[in-house]
Amino acid sequence: MRRYGKNPDEDDIRSRPNPKGNRPRTNIRPKHEDAAEGMVLTVDRGRLTCLVGDTVVLAMKARELGRKAAVVGDQVMLVGDLSGKKDTLARIVRIEKRRSVLRRTADDDDPFERVVVANADQLAVVTALADPEPRPRLIDRCLVAAFDAGLEPLLILTKSDLASAAGLLETYRPLGIRYVVTRRDELATGEAADRVREYLEGRMTAFVGHSGVGKTTLVNALVPDDRRRTTGQVNAVTGRGRHTTTSALALPLEKVDGWVIDTPGIRSFGLHHVDPSRVILAFPDLVPGTENCPRGCSHDEPDCALDAWVAEGHADPSRLDSLRRLLSTRERREGD
């Protein structure tokens, strides 16, 4: 039996009404030409605090961004209520291209990358010389991540009144890394913050370090108007500090132009995402010596051309030793 006659018209065709009254789906997305530019200051449970001009705005991510997530340091475009008033919410509709991305994984076997911060220029690795004891392997891992991300590393050694910095500085001397050594009493006078601030001017600097080293205390001294909770005491049994920073937070520097990003204390810094071939780029004096290396050379094998090149006097042997130490750190545990 035919449902319609020979010449059905529109009146003969019955259509089911849309019970929800939704508009038809479309792949065309609005361009948001009126969106305002801002920077992500911190992220907390799906809500992002952004700075738009001089106004701090609470925002959420637009559904059209899909699984792409914004992180601290991201430059984003926002629409909606940008007044910053209580109980208002803006919407992030676009994440701008990142200049740099600092990543880490939970461990070397974990393929899931975690973006720590975006658009940083510098990575300040903070470590105490005592209470808790320094962990050189963890420092090495942070340096590898910095070199891989194209960030300039800065080594900040705290609590020099408890132990000498000479031994640790000698370890990293061949790398040519800039460093600052501070004492605990200098934090109260502001002298420590003044010396560190000289290396931060005009940059966005991410601070990393394991708990108890004085990282957040130093950040508080650099940004006294917006203090974070101070570091907790070091556990007498484990020798490790308590986490007092639970989320990354970008803060403007006092007295000079620049930003600091305080990150949660880390217990490990996985390097599963790092391509060893990129680490050599942080050693420009060694790069020419790799021209005769075999394809896929790890720079730590018998056929590596760097051995002969360094032996001919083209570079300091300690630089090659440092490169290989950093490359091998991916195979070690942080506590070794």
Image: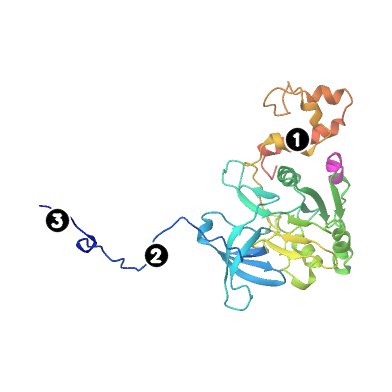
- Main SS, magenta residues: helix
Q: Image height check: is 165 above or below 331?
A: below
Span of residues in magenta: 168-176
- How far apart marks 3 and 1 lie (CA) works out to 78 Å
Q: Image height check: is 207 above or below 300?
A: below
Q: Which residue does the numbered mark 1 point to in the structure image?
A: 280
The earlier-in-sequence mark between 3 and 2 is 3
In the rendered structure, are the residues bearing label 3 and label 2 in contact, judged by CB atoms less than 8 Å apart?
no
- How far apart marks 3 and 2 lie (CA) works out to 31 Å
How packed mark 3 is, by other alpha carbons closer than 10 Å (few <14, some 14-19, many 20 or more), is: few
Name the spot of residue 47 as percent of width and height, x first. 58, 66
Secondary element under disc 3, as helix, strand or loop, is loop
What's the residue type where badge 3 is placed?
A: Gly
> For residue 76, what is the image quadrant?
bottom right
In the displayed structure, does residue 192 sit left or right of residue 210? right
Q: Image height check: is 151 above or below 63?
A: above
- Look at 88% across and 27% down and name the residue there: 314
Q: Which residue does the numbered mark 3 point to in the structure image?
A: 5
Residue at the farthest left position: 1
- How far apart marks 1 and 2 lie (CA) works out to 55 Å
In the displayed structure, does residue 225 sit left or right of residue 111? right
Secondary element under disc 1, as helix, strand or loop, is helix
What's the residue type where badge 2 is placed?
A: Arg
Residue at the farthest bottom position: 86
In the displayed structure, does residue 118 sit left or right of residue 60? right
The earlier-in-sequence mark between 1 and 2 is 2
Q: Which mark is residue 23?
A: 2
For residue 170: magenta? yes
Q: Image height check: is 291 above or below 122?
A: above
What's the residue type where badge 1 is placed?
A: Ile
Secondary element under disc 2, as helix, strand or loop, is loop
In the displayed structure, does residue 69 sit left or right of residue 316? left
